[in-house]
Amino acid sequence: MIHGDFAQYNEDQTGDPFHLENKKLLKVSLQYGPVMAKSGAMVAYQGNASFKNLGSGGLSKMIKKAVTNEGLTAMEVSGDGQVFLANQGMDIQVMYLENDAVFCNGASVLAFSASIEMDIERVGSGGGGMRMMAGAMAGGFYQVSLRGTGYVAVTSDGPPVILDVASANTVADADAVVLWTNGVSMQPRIDTGGIKSMMRGGTGEMLQLAFGGQGWVMVQPSEGVIQGAAQPQQSGGGGLGGLLGG
């Protein structure tokens, strides 16, 4: 006989297309149509579900990923059941886009509706010393865009904070940024802390992302390597540092 109070862990009986069973586990109801999910993110399913590997989402995106080291290795999930998704015990954030867009690191994307279009885009390249140093590491900065109408689920390493970029000058460590909204401009920059700081090993805050415009940026309470994140060429690091492409 098994003794224990497991009622708190019972599945929520809801028909919502994207539903958080808890902060680390997402349930997707497939009767609303196929969804795209990070490959390997399925932890369980009930009813009928089939999984089709999509690689990087088409030939053009596969070429972009090969060039940039950025992107999302995805699978298409279809059927009439419910699939449960998670990634390394990370927190999950769900949002609904209505003819809108968000921009993020491919490693942060957990799942999105089939009606959402994913692409890889180059962003501000900067210039001068920043460009020289960034170029030595990679040669460009890229972002994953998710556009259209439907659900998007992303992961964060702990509970994130939402910062309104219009209210104040907003700069974040590249490894801590999860995503930002349409209407927000992002400019990579290098902060070496000066020659003396570099000689002492640097500040650890060299690669930063400066935000402006109208909207918000989501920042996670971690600067660690995201499991499965794209890695910058000729350099260590993870997270949005993975936006460095070759």
Image (cartoon, rainbow, N blue to C red):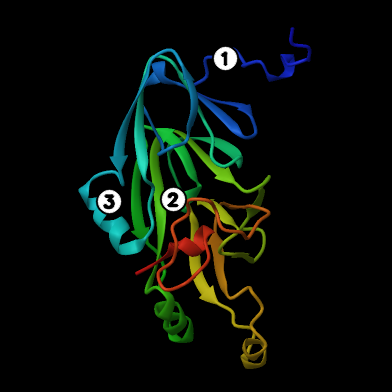
Give SS at disc 1.
Answer: loop
Identity of the residue drawn at 40% across and 44% down: 146
- Dot 1 surroundings within 10 Å: few (below 14), some, or many (20 or more)? few
Which residue is located at x 37 percent, y 74 percent? Answer: 139
Q: Which mark is residue 61?
A: 3
Residue 98 badge: none
Q: Which residue is mark 2?
A: 106
Residue 216: x and y in percent read: 58, 52
Q: Residue at x 43, y 66 (%)?
A: 232
Tag 1: amino acid? Thr
Instruction: Give the side of residue 51 with respect to residue 163, left or right.
Output: left
Q: Residue at x 56, y 43 (%)?
A: 155
Quarter of the image where one finds residue 243: bottom left
Q: CA distance from mark 3 to mark 2?
A: 12 Å
Residue type highlighted by circle 3: Lys
Give the residue number, with chain letter if any, for mark 1.
Answer: 14
- Callouts 3 and 2 close, C-beta under 8 Å: no
Q: Quadrant of the C terminus?
A: bottom left
Residue 115 visible in image: no
* Dot 3: element: helix
